[in-house]
Amino acid sequence: MVNVALLFVAAIMYVSAVGGGIEILGPFVLKEPLSWSATQVGYGNAAGCTIFLTSFLGVMVFRRYISDTSLILIGMLSFALGIYFMSFVTATYMFYLARSLSLFALIPMPTIRSLLSQQVPASYCGTTLTSLQLALKFASLAYLPAFTKIYQRTLGWFPGFVFTLSSIITVLGMIPICVIGCRSPKRQRHETIQGD
């Protein structure tokens, strides 16, 4: 139950950080200093879509070598670095550089759901995942207006403040995952013993 609660907390914090940060990214690129045109916004959205592919490839490659908790931490760290760099973007090339740091940002949530399903009996799996989705929907009712208000109030002195805040929330969301990693049994390496 402790692991389930920690996964819920981590998921809510991460979804809040990602949802709030990406929600503000739209208005952010339209205003100064970027002042993008509709064409540039399209290219920016296309760059964001490549994260789906890189996250998928990341899961395929990393899953063979590292645990689920490490996989989640890689994705969270990737997003935290990318969105923090976005705070200081003043030119188009910097935007794409910031997005390239978030190549694995979509790994955490599916992996959290997978890890969550392993923590409960099979008969409770559906109920647990539905409860998580419900909690994330309720969280969106709080973080979307909150991030919008913060962006409006900080637009004059630091337009990227919400991205820094999003990065901080992501880093805080990594703490429950680290705790789960410490609580989980380590994989044991088995050596083949050859007979005489």
Image (spheres, grey):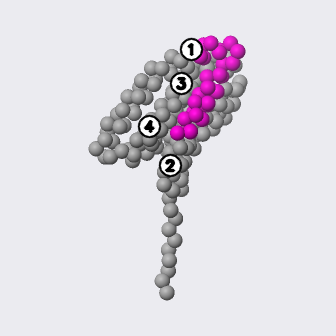
As drawn, is 80 to the left or to the right of 129?
Answer: right
Residue shown at 51% from the left, 16% from the top: 145
Determine which residue is flagged by label 4. Answer: 5
Q: Which numbered circle lies on residue 20?
A: 3
Task: Indicate which disc, 4 or 2, sits on the residue closer to the N terminus.
Answer: 4
3D distance between C-alphas at marks 4 and 1: 29 Å
Q: Amino acid at mark 3?
A: Gly
How far from the left and from the top, in percent, is residue 129? 36, 37
Magenta highlight: main SS: helix
How many numbered badges does the structure rendering display?
A: 4
Q: Amino acid at mark 2?
A: Arg
3D distance between C-alphas at marks 2 and 3: 30 Å
Task: Indicate which disc, 3 or 4, sits on the residue closer to the N terminus.
Answer: 4
Determine which residue is flagged by label 1. Answer: 149
Q: Check residue 172 for magenta coloring.
A: yes
Q: Which numbered circle lies on residue 183?
A: 2
Dot 4 falls on a residue whose secondary structure is: helix
How far from the left and from the top, in percent, is residue 155? 65, 14
Task: Indicate which disc, 1 or 3, sits on the residue closer to the N terminus.
Answer: 3
3D distance between C-alphas at marks 1 and 3: 11 Å
Residue shown at 50% from the left, 36% from the top: 10
- Which contiguous range is marked in magenta? 150-176
